[in-house]
Image (cartoon, rainbow, N blue to C red):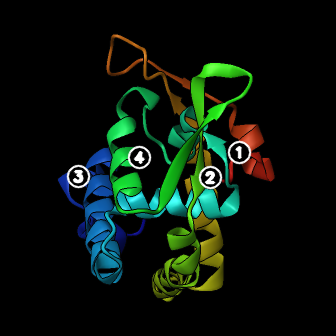
Amino acid sequence: MSNMVQTQLRFNGSVWCNLDIALRNLDQLFNRAIQPLGLTIIEWYILRALYERDGQHASELARAVGRAATSFTPNLDKLQQKGYVERRPDPTDRRAVHIYLTDVAEKNRKEVLTTAKEIDVEVRRLFDAQEFDTFLNVLATMQTIEPDYNADKPNDTHTASKTSARNGNGRH
């Protein structure tokens, strides 16, 4: 690690602490960008996931946005109250529901996706092309860490092989 990078990192380069700080900074950037839409960040993530594939099971959708299915319902309730999504029963499993976009969500699709693209462009400007590619590879590898939301211990995680992540299988 270069001296310049080391001096910019806090807490002796602690990965978790520095990722948390970076994420909080990005959260503020995202909040400012989506505030006019009247959405929270998690609602924005959910809509983006549904724009990619509408009609997902609620549990699949929770995983897609990195949340535990057991605590995901309030997020869906708020989006439903705002008129963005509707729940439909799964015809083969009466315990499950599919989440679908409404006309309101479709009317806001362009603005939600444009905002996402603008933020991505802003973040990309911080890096040259090679650095950004390395950054994406690091993110892809880190996304292969799959938390066990049912685990009793906070450190109990299952990780996928680095090989699959580096081959592009870890990208979302």
Is disc 1 in contact with disc 3, using a CB cutoff of under 8 Å?
no
Residue depth check, mark 1 versus mark 3: number of the one nearer the observer = 1
Give the Cα distance between marks 1 and 4: 30 Å
Q: CA distance from mark 2 to mark 4?
A: 27 Å
Q: Residues within 10 Å of mark 2 (few under 14, many from 20)?
A: many
Q: Alpha-carbon neighbours of circle 1 within 10 Å: few (<14), some, or many (≥20)?
A: many
Q: Give how far apart the Cα atoms at labels 2 and 1 are.
A: 6 Å
Q: Can you give x and y, in whole percent of width and height, for residue 4 in the image?
A: 33, 75
134 versus 132 height, above or below: above
Which residue in the protein does label 4 denote? Answer: 76
Front: mark 2 or 3: 2
Mark 4 vs mark 3, foreground winner is 4
Q: CA distance from mark 2 to mark 3?
A: 24 Å
Query: Residue type at mark 1?
Result: Ala
Q: Earlier in the sequence, mark 1 or mark 4?
A: 4
Q: Is residue 142 above or below residue 134?
A: above
**Image position, residue 27 (x, y; %):** 30, 66
The residue identified by callout 2 is 140
Residue 36 is situated, as x and y percent measured from the top left of the image, at: 30, 83
Q: Secondary structure at mark 1?
A: helix
Q: Check contact, mark 2 vs mark 3: CB within 8 A.
A: no
Left or right: residue 84 compared with residue 77: right
Label located before the other in sequence (2 or 3): 3
Q: CB of mark 1 within 8 Å of CB of mark 4?
A: no
Distance from the alpha carbon under mark 1 to that under mark 3: 27 Å
Label 3 crowd (10 A; few <14 / some 14-19 / many >=20): few
Residue at 58 percent across and 33 percent down: it is 97
Residue under label 1: 165
Determine which of the numbered discs, if any, sits on residue 12 in the image. 3
Question: Between 108 and 91, which is closer to the camera in this rendering?
Answer: 91
Question: Are the residues flagged by discs 2 and 1 in contact, CB closer than 8 Å?
Answer: yes
